[in-house]
Image (spheres, helix red, strand yellow):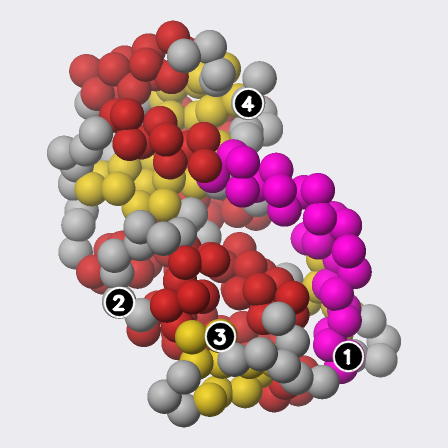
Amino acid sequence: MPRMLIVEDSTQLRELVAEYFRKTGAFDVDAAKDGNEGFSFVSKNDYDIAILDIMLPGLSGFDICKILRRKSRCPIVFLTALGTEDNILKGYSLGADEYMVKPFSIKVLYAKCLALLARSAGEDEDAKILMCGEIRMDPSRMEVRVGRDGSEVELAPKEYFLLKVLMENQGHVLGRSRLLDRVWGADFDGSERVVDSHIKKLRKSLGSSGDLIKTVIGCGYKITP
């Protein structure tokens, strides 16, 4: 049974979400009342998915997200009242997989979590080694190495999945909308410029191999050896 972490300071909302997910019989749920308790849970346990508020006593949801990403690739959902574009982009830049603004539908939240788990499981099952120039990706380990010496590169989750989609479609131009669908999900309603900012970060992370990612003006991006 997938193990879920919920970090939410509203007692009513925390209990509502936790109880709903427990009653489905599909999740084992840990619920934390603030950021510090959330940190304690993360330090002691491994999770398959996490739902985080942002404005919390103690550590913020952004802090918890960063801590989770240091040890896990599990899907992370922000569930928050902060709905500005800057906050949404920050959430995704830290490695979140979904961003939902309160008020929300608990049925939609549940459906999103199931979809994220299915997507995550699909990534785990893909063991094919991907090569492009001096970039070598092992999806089974979520490992990326570059250069003749095979130095490992640490990528943020969204950078990793962007690179994976590009490498799976070598030589083909992928538009921003398609990259958004594949990496952020079809229901992402933020700006397409989030793709540009993550491509920029990805190129920097890959060093000289970042030049393999080409911008096709007016169309999107492609990777070619």
Q: Earlier in the sequence, mark 2 or mark 4?
A: 4
Q: Is residue 40 magenta?
A: no
Q: Which residue is mark 4?
A: 2
* Mark-to-mark CA distance, 4 and 1: 36 Å
Kind of element beneath mark 1: loop
Side of 219 relative to 225 (left or right): left
Q: Earlier in the sequence, mark 1 or mark 3?
A: 1
Q: Amino acid at mark 4?
A: Pro
Q: Which residue is mark 3?
A: 174
- Mark 4 burial class by Cα count in 10 Å: few <14, some 14-19, many 20+: few
Q: Amino acid at mark 2?
A: Ser
User: Quick one: quadrant of the N terminus?
Assistant: top right
* Image location (x, y in percent) of residue 59: 34, 38
User: Quick one: quadrant of the C terminus?
Assistant: bottom right
- Mark 3 burial class by Cα count in 10 Å: few <14, some 14-19, many 20+: some
Nearer-the-camera pick, 220 or 33 = 220
Asked if marks 3 and 4 touch (Cβ < 8 Å), the reply is no
* Mark-to-mark CA distance, 3 and 4: 33 Å
Q: Quadrant of residue 34?
A: top left
Q: Earlier in the sequence, mark 4 or mark 1?
A: 4
Q: Which residue is mark 1?
A: 134
Q: Which residue is mark 2?
A: 191
Q: Amino acid at mark 3?
A: Leu
